Image (cartoon, rainbow, N blue to C red):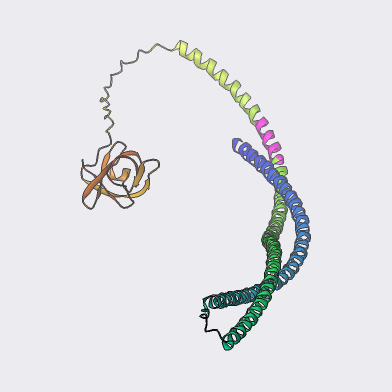
Amino acid sequence: MEKSKVILVILIVLFLGSGFLAFNYYNQAQRLFQEKQTLIRENRELSKDLDRYKGENQRLISKNKKLSLRLAKIEDDLDRIEKERDEYKRRYEDIKEERESLVEELKKLKQIRVERPSPVKGEVSDEYWQDVLQKKAEFQAQVEELLSELKEKDAQVKSLKMKNEELVSKISSLENVKEELERKLNFNSRTIEILTRDLVREREDKKSILEEIRKLKGENISLGRELTLTKKMRADLERTLSKLQDEKQILERKVKDMETTLREKALEMSALQKQLSQAIFSAKEVIPEESKAVELPPIVVKPETKASLPTTTLEGKILAVNEKEKFVIIDLGSSSGIKPGNKFSVVRRGEEIGSLEVIETRQDISACDIKVTKQRLKEGDIVKFTP
């Protein structure tokens, strides 16, 4: 009877648990379906954004190419203007040198004219004055020629200066245009780079979303199968429950029959007890023999022995070092007889470089506080315990 009740309770619990699991699976399937629809909508929006970014990227690339061509043309113009400026500068230097040479020649002619000795009185002749006049005419012609050349050179120098100033202003304006184009080019390059990164990230997001959708589809299929299986289990449990209810009714009838039988037996037992009590009062009193005392041997409880320390010198290694918290892990544990409070010395190349104290043990490892260190502890350092 008790066994049947336990089985009945277990089956009811199983039925309720399967119903709860089926309800959870149904809710999870609905949630996954909603997430799937949301992911599909997001995927469509991302595809639209991707197409828009692609168009923007192509437009920026074409604009960048145009700016690059314009920048190359401006750089060519700058090179050509710089060459012309260098040429004008060279011509200016040549003209300046010619002018200086003409000025020097003019000075020499004037000096020669001044230093020419005057004739001695009484020795003046017509040939002398004729020669002087001829020389003077020649010098005058040379001076006028030099002055005219000097004026021409001055005019050329002024025109070259004006052209140089124009070229300088033109170069400065072209450099400003070049800087502006470079700024635009850099801005477009950064924009293209950002758009490229966004495109790559969106493609990766799209791939991950598609992968998530595939996983959700697989999970949805598996959940559908599990839901079908759960429904079958629920139907089986309902059939089993109906059978158990029938068995329960049968057992209840048997229990009622047994209770009736037990009441009858109880009435018979009460009658027998009355007869027995009458027989006891009528019987003679019997004095029982004095029972012998039985001595039990004393129970000896052995005191709990303390964990004994290792009796031999133990040697291990440092497995890990935590310098921030100032503790290490060694490869000796409770299986070797180590317990909290034991002290170890750290040895490297035969020299003691520090001391440790055990704070916690496991079967094969122990954690130790770093008490004293002469050098920085490392993994692989030898630890020794001497009793």
Quarter of image, res 62: bottom right
Seen from the viewer's position, the closer of residues 70 and 283 is: 70
Quarter of image, res 152: bottom right
Q: Is residue 304 above or below residue 228?
A: above
Seen from the viewer's position, the closer of residues 206 and 374 is: 374
Residue 125 placement (x, y as % from top left): 56, 86
Q: Is residue 122 above or below residue 181?
A: below
Image label count: 0
Location of the C terminus (image quadrant): top left
Seen from the viewer's position, the closer of residues 237 and 97 is: 97
Q: Is residue 256 magenta?
A: yes
Residue 103 placement (x, y as % from top left): 59, 74
Seen from the viewer's position, the closer of residues 180 and 152 is: 152
For the point 23% across and 53% down, the residue is 349
Q: Is residue 115 left or right of residue 215?
A: left
Residue 312 placement (x, y as % from top left): 20, 45
Q: Is residue 83 above or below residue 48?
A: below
Please report the bounds of the magenta region as a residue range. 245-257
Location of the N terminus (image quadrant): top right
Quick check: can you spot residue 279? yes
Name, please, the residue furthest toward the bottom.
Answer: 127
Residue 383 placement (x, y as % from top left): 27, 47
Quick check: can you spot residue 200? no
Q: Is residue 94 left or right of residue 39?
A: left
Q: Is residue 10 magenta?
A: no
- Main SS of the magenta part reads helix
Name, please, the residue furthest toward the front.
Answer: 122
For the point 54% across and 15% down, the residue is 274
